Amino acid sequence: MRTLLILLCLVAAYSSTKADTILVDKVIAVVGDKVILLSDVELQYEQLKLEQDVPLSAKCELLNSILTSKLFLEAALQDSVAVSDDEVETELDRRVGYFVSMLGGQEQLEEYYGKSILEIKNEFRTDIREQLLSQRMQGKIYSNVKVGPSDVKKFFNLIPTDSLPYFNAEVEVGHVIMSPIASEFSKEIARKKAEEVLTLLETDPDADFCFLVSRYSNDPGTQDKCGDLGTVGRGEFVTEFEAAAFALEEGEHSGVVETKYGFHIIQMVKKKGNRITVRHILIVPAVLGSDHELVKSKLDGIRDSLVNGTMSFAYAVKKYSEDDETKHQGGILSNPATGSSYFEIGQLDKTIYFGLEGLKPGEYSIPLSMQLPNGQPAYRILFLKSETQPHVANLTEDYYKIQAAALKKKQDEALGMWLEERIKGTYVWLSPDYAGCLSLKKWFKEDNSSNNNYE
């Protein structure tokens, strides 16, 4: 799936070279009533070239992937598979929000792309809906595909001995993360400050909301944007903020609302059903050096309990860790490159790599300083769950990897059967230009040559 950022980069790149190169676009394939353009393949090919060296033949595989995605979409519509508007908006907001933070702010993204956030969202809304529909249809195809221990063993035994994969040294790592929090004294000072700002807003005719944001708000992401948090749906904000925000009518502002981030004054800009546009002023309590020492001391105590066996790692994660991403998986990190819990040494973040130095499997690091994705300081205990040496694949050490490979093979077989049947019952036209692509042979039909009106 193309990421939004790559699309933005490629669109910008194509725009900047228009004067020198004219890309003559044309229809190269049709699935049902879904048209595939030459530019669809070219954009994805350019993305691949940014990541690695690829031959021209890769365009065959890219087109195969696009054709499959269009067939998923066509089938989803025929089989009444659906995604809601809220799901589309949530995913769209999530992706755009990610790239806003990646590029340093909403203005930077708008400047880079040359369009407003609203225009960007409108441009990609259909793409997001189609991607979600295709994913849901693919999930439906795979829903009944399972592998048990006997399937895994059979799959492994069918691999020739001289073809068994060789695995590099790998580790499984977990962590417990805690952030220093402001003392009650600091919170009280921040609360009083927020109440003073609220009083100014309500009594001083010259102190409008935008002025107060620029003067007092501690939210660096919205301070120069009148506190604008964008348009979002339910479930996007923490509970206390959301409850206060949705209770407001357009033009109204809240009282002082406390969340884990600090003290907010919220202004409702626009309200339509379950989607709102709001601004806020945020007063953040000061975190002092003593607060840092307190959280390190608490982690020291947790580590002592882990080392002497009076507390399990799973319990420590569940009770104390503030990392929501790993909390539901017992604190164990997932490798984004593979989706598994195993990391080759070179795939580890440097701070984790050095934090594991000297540890043996089952041991815990001392509390280590780190920085959260939002730039805030935190501390963590690292747990080295397992460590394997370089070795040839075997069922004892690599069961879950072999299980994943067996499942993938079974899913590929199920998909192949589904594609064969679905292609038969769907109108498919493919340009003869791609007749030499082995991976595309299943898409060509006997009457394909007569349907050449799309060239």
Image (cartoon, rainbow, N blue to C red):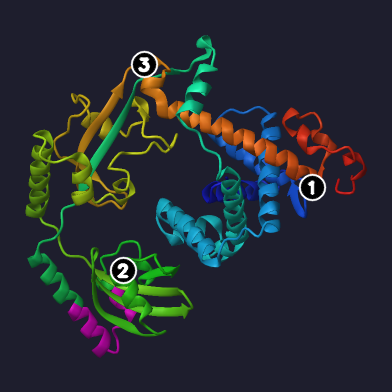
Q: Main secondary structure of the magenta part?
A: helix
Disc 2: CA contacts within 10 A as few (<14), some (14-19) or many (>=20): few
Residue that label 3 marks: 390
Query: What residue span does the magenta drawing correspond to?
Result: 195-213
Disc 3: CA contacts within 10 A as few (<14), some (14-19) or many (>=20): few
Task: Give the camera-side residue of 205 and 360.
Answer: 360
Compared across the picture, whether 102 is left or right of 284 comes to: right
Residue 442's disc is: none
Where residue 328 sits: x, y (%)?
32, 48
209 drawn magenta: yes
Residue that label 2 marks: 239
Task: Give the camera-side residue of 31 and 100.
Answer: 31
Q: Sequence-wise, which precedes: disc 2 or disc 3?
A: 2
Helix, strand or loop at label 1? It is loop
Residue that label 1 marks: 425
Q: Specify the quadrant of the image occupied by residue 432.
A: top right
201 drawn magenta: yes
Quick one: which residue is furthest to the front in this view?
Answer: 150
